[in-house]
Image: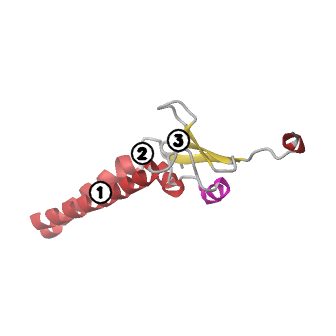
Amino acid sequence: MQLPSFFSFQKVLAPLVAVGLIALAYRSYGWPGVAGAVGALVMWMLLHFTRMLQVMQRAAKRPKGYVDSAVMLNAKLRKGMTLLHVVAMTRALGEPLSALGVQPEIFRWTDGSASSVECEFGGGRLKNWRLVRPSTDAADAAP
């Protein structure tokens, strides 16, 4: 059974878990428990935000759409990975191939040998990808 697209962990379940945790903390320890639970939730959000900033700072230092090895990136990709995870692996933002705000989003990462990986993201998650290798025909090598 597939859940509707609007029913995702980040949009629905995470806030429900947070509210449940706070309610459980209040029931068990009263107001000090609520303070502890809210403090833990804020710490978790700060850790996530810090990781996201580190990934984006590393990506800002490299050319857009560049990866060290497209073949290695192709081998490491898995369906369902987030865009943030892929950017963390490549240490670079992808070159956008789709229009801004249009789903699915398509990005390309290219290495020094002109091999590239085109990734299709739907809802921020990796759906499909393909490795594109440059042609090595004898006709291309002729002067």
* Residue at point 42%, 41% (across, down): 6
Q: Is residue 77 left or right of residue 49?
A: right
Quarter-wise, where is residue 37 in the image?
bottom left
Residue bearing mark 1: 45
> Which residue range is magenta in the image?
70-78
Q: Residues within 10 Å of mark 3 (few under 14, many from 20)?
A: some
Q: Nearer the viewer, mark 2 or mark 3?
A: 3
Q: Magenta region's main secondary structure?
A: helix
Please tell me whether residue 126 belongs to the stretch shown in magenta. Answer: no
In the rendered structure, which amino acid carries the disc numbered 3? Gly
Q: Is residue 121 left or right of residue 141?
A: left
* Residue nearest the observer in this picture, 107 or 137: 137
Q: Secondary structure at mark 2?
A: loop
In the rendered structure, which amino acid carries the disc numbered 2? Phe
**Extreme residue in the bottom direction:** 29
- Give the image location of residue 90, x and y in percent: 54, 54
Residue bearing mark 3: 122
Quarter-wise, where is residue 18 in the image?
bottom left
Of the two numbered discs 2 and 3 on the same chain, state the one appearing first in sequence: 2
* Residue nearest the observer in this picture, 47 or 29: 47
Please tell me whether residue 73 belongs to the stretch shown in magenta. Answer: yes
Residue bearing mark 2: 7
* Residue at point 48%, 31% (across, down): 100
Q: Nearer the viewer, mark 1 or mark 2?
A: 1
In the rendered structure, which amino acid carries the disc numbered 1? Met
Q: Is residue 100 left or right of residue 110?
A: left
